[in-house]
Image: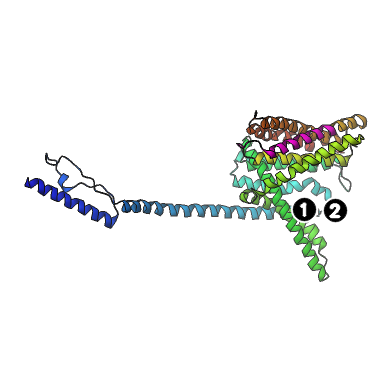
Amino acid sequence: MACKRIGAHHEALTIIDSFSAADCTGNTAVTASPAADTASPANPAAVTAKPVNPVAALESQARPASATQVPRQRSLATLKKSSTTNEFVMMSILACAAAIAVRAPELFGVSLENEPDFYLRNLSVLVLPFLVGYFARTRNLSAGWTARLAALLAVSATVMNLYPFEGGDNPGDTLVLAAVHLPLLLWLAVGVAHCGGDWRNHEKRLEFVRFTGEWCIYFGLIAFGGSVLMSLTVGVFAVIGTNITDLVGLWLTPGAAAGAVVVAGWLADTRKGVLERLAPVLTRLFTPMFALLLFAFLAAAIISGSGIEASRELLITFDVLLVVVLALVLYSVAVRYQQASPGIFDIAQTALVIAALLADVFVLSVMVDRLSELGATPNRLAALGINLVLLVNLAGAAWLYIGFLRGRISFQRLERWQAGYAPVYAVWLTIVVAVLPLMFGFA
């Protein structure tokens, strides 16, 4: 009996010591009590757990976590800052290189004044490769894709410079068409680099569409600010009797515009959060306006009954209008939340697509009549082709939008339709740049 009391007394002392140790150190380890060092019939427990102080336990758990998380967070922030700095340095170098590339032909006596058709042929070839290089670097583009894009740029430059286009003060239609369509073709090369070579991924294609919309806004803002700055510069120097209009217009403006292409690409790529709300708002603002414009055009054409003349200016104006409408549709599809239910803006978007489709059919009928009466020309054939390409796209988009509004089709199908149509644009742009001049003898 005395032995049992002595054992209990030692065990109580051990428990008291464990509380004091936990209060002083905050440790929560499990230790064996002296009474449990040897098993006996009087004490069957082999090990006794040391009681834990809850406050000390929480402090001991919090201290190691914070000690490891803070350096880790600092290292991630430092890595992100370093990556942003590297991208900024790369952008600055490539923007300066683009500006120099535009002005470099001056060293060989080729200027914008005496050789305007040279810049008409090569302006996009001189500028866009630097934006391709930016994304090839930031996206870690593979050597295979880098070689393919380099080959595309080299072939484009070769075609534009070796084809015997009619230049001079009155350039031929095929040269103008090739010069207008080549930047769009090379912009698809920018898209391949932006996607990191994974061009078949529909999500990455739509991401490039979003990038394109934000790039346009950034470039427009830079162009507006730059034009104000240039105007003020000319005005300030005019006060002291110095005319620098030629210096600003022929020297500074082309190089600044070329550099702005790369700067706008860097801003759209690294400052995505700035325009995430502005660009969709602009899209929602202009979508109903363009829909009303197209419906008003159709109503006026039907009421007047006089039809329209398929002149060159009209074809260009209408094609630009359709391209803008298509850009609104593409960007709206790219920025829309997939799982959202159909809403008022989807109805407005459907109305815009239907109005553009009807207007396209109306103008196509006029084009076919003119082609049968007056024959084919480069401008008429190019306009006919792009309108047929847009007709198929708009017809498919209208069908899918109506199905989506009726709840029979998911919005993902509309996304896949628009993203999967990109190769069709690439084929048509290639035909206009490389094949159409051959068909009409570069006239």
**Is residue 62 toward the left or the right of residue 393 in the image?**
left
Q: Which quadrant would the N terminus be assigned to in this image? A: top left
- Residue under pointer 1: 105
Query: Residue 309 falls in which quadrant of the image?
Result: top right
Label 1: few (<14), some (14–19) or many (≥20) C-alpha neighbours in 10 Å: some
Overall secondary structure of the magenta section: helix
Image coordinates of residue 371 in percent, x first then y, are 89, 31
Q: Where is residue 154 shown, x and y percent of the image?
A: 72, 42
**Horizontal relation, residue 225 to residue 176: left or right:** left
In screen coordinates, is 10 left or right of 171? Answer: left
- Amino acid type, residue under disc 2 in the picture: Asn
Q: Which residue is mark 2?
A: 114
Query: Observer-nearest residue: 435 or 369?
Result: 369
Res. 245 image quadrant: bottom right
Query: Does dot 1 land on a helix, a strand or a loop?
Result: helix
Quadrant containing the C terminus in the rendered view: top right
The stretch in magenta equals: 336-363
Q: 398 or 82, which is in the foreground? A: 398
Q: In the image, is 225 to the left or to the right of 315? A: left
The amino acid sitting under disc 1 is: Pro
> In the current view of this chain or complex, which residue is farthest to the front?
344
Question: What percent of the width, then of the height, locates residue 240?
Answer: 81, 71
The answer to whether the residue labelled 2 contacts the one labelled 1, judged by CB atoms less than 8 Å apart, is: no
Is residue 354 found inside the magenta-colored segment of the image? yes
